[in-house]
Amino acid sequence: MGASIHISGTGSSIIDTVFVCRSTGTVPRRLISSDPTEVAGMIRRDLVDLARGGVKPTAGDIRCVGFGHVIRLAVWFLRASWNRTSPAADRLAAVQTWVDRHMQGGSAVMDALSDEFANAPRQQPLVLNEERADYGRQEEPVPF
């Protein structure tokens, strides 16, 4: 399964979090924690890596990276009890319960990043402005 998290309305401009769920494999032990302070440390390391790449994340970008980690960890900790035949609403509720219980809905992680948010720019500098494409009439199929 693949997923991409972009939090609409947060001012996120260029960062998108993608995670893939696999049934087997390995993950570095340092990336597994249910402690919000440790998760904030993971996010800080990601922000350092982004800065090395010439990116200064906005507050929305920081939230995208942060909630990507929170959801990744919820999936990790729920994997042993996950029932893929349960109704989607029940599975989403299980994720929400884990996030609420261990990350206070994510706010504990975001609160630990207050300095990063205080120093984040409001938006990325505009570096690209694509022309609007004309796809023809509304009824016409658009190949992709």
Image (cartoon, grey):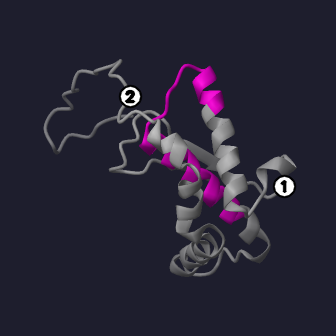
Mark 2 / mark 1, whichever is N-terminal: 1
Residue 31 visible from this viewpoint: yes
Going by the numbered disc 1, the residue's amino acid type is: Thr
Task: Give the vertical position of 118 relative to 32 (above or below).
Answer: above
Question: For the C terminus, which image quadrant?
Answer: top left
Residue at disc 2, secondary structure: loop
Magenta: main secondary structure equals helix
Q: Which of 25/133 is in front? A: 25
Image position, residue 30 (x, y; %): 82, 48
The residues bearing labels 2 and 1 have C-alpha atoms spaced at a distance of 37 Å
Task: Give the vertical position of 38 relative to 57 (above or below).
Answer: below
Q: Which residue is depicted at the point 59% across and 54% down?
A: 112
Q: Which residue is depicted at the point 55% across and 19% down?
A: 54
Image position, residue 117 (x, y; %): 47, 43
Residue 51: quarter of image: top right
Residue 136 drawn in magenta: no
For residue 124, the mark is 2
Image position, residue 126 (x, y; %): 32, 22
Residue 70 drawn in magenta: yes
Residue that badge 1 annotates: 24
Going by the numbered disc 2, the residue's amino acid type is: Gln
The residue stretch that appears in magenta? 48-75
Task: Give the vertical position of 80 relative to 61 (above or below).
Answer: below
Image position, residue 98 (x, y; %): 64, 73
Q: Residue furthest left?
A: 137
Residue 141: quarter of image: top left
Residue at disc 1, secondary structure: loop
Q: Is residue 135 left or right of residue 7?
A: left
